[in-house]
Amino acid sequence: MNDADKLKIYTAMAETTRKWVSVMDTKAGFISALNAGLLGFVWTGAKLIDGSCWSKGLAITATAFSIASLWVALRIVLPRASLKHVFGRHTEYVEDFKPISFYGFVADHYPKGEDGRFIDDVKKLDEVALIDEALEQHFTTSHVVQAKSKCVAIAGLFLKTALLLTGAALFSKVLL
């Protein structure tokens, strides 16, 4: 396999991984919308806070879980503009590597007005350097997707708990 074929394959891998970032962001948005609906139901629709001590306590606990779910979902959609945001610690790129497809690097290393220098640097890259770029982006974005996926799972668990508590509060309000 020649370098041009490798470049096509690795670029496709990196693009597929980037799409998974959008999937996780969409899931976080869906969880946020469900939480907003749940909070509206608890506080205005069913007015569970006006019920018995049990329903009030369950509704407040459900609210806490729903807000925690919203907080985690917000963490999912916040941008990761540096390697520190991705890996949780300061990390440098290897040697003179230039991740030209990563907006954070481009914006930090090529200020406004230096678009000509950026274009010149990119044009100097050969196929091997572009292959390295595609693989590095796939690697880094894979870590972003994994972090987002873990947060989606946590936000979903908090939402499920909030829904169960809301159901219990509703049941308690009707029976007591």
Image (cartoon, rainbow, N blue to C red):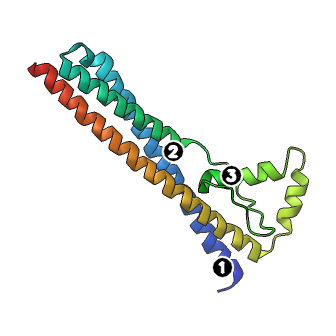
Residue at the disc numbered 1:
5
In this orientation, which residue lies closer to the viewer: 150 or 17?
A: 150
- Residue 76, labelled with which disc? 2
Residue type at tag 1: Asp
The residue most toward the bottom is 1
Question: Label 2 crowding class (10 Å Cα cut-off): few <14, some 14-19, many 20+?
Answer: many
The earlier-in-sequence mark between 2 and 3 is 2
Residue 20 appears in the figure: no
Left/right of residue 38 with respect to residue 22 in the rendered view: left
Please tell me whether mark 1 sits on a helix, a strand or a loop.
Answer: helix
At horizontal 45% and vertical 53% (from top left) the residue drawn is 149
Q: Quadrant of residue 133?
A: bottom right
Lateral position of residue 35 relative to residue 120, left or right: left
Q: What number of labels is visible?
A: 3
| Marks 1, 2: nearer the viewer | 2
Find residue 82 and name its label.
3
Vertically, is 115 above or below 132?
above
The percent position of residue 107, horizontal first and vertical second, equals 78, 48
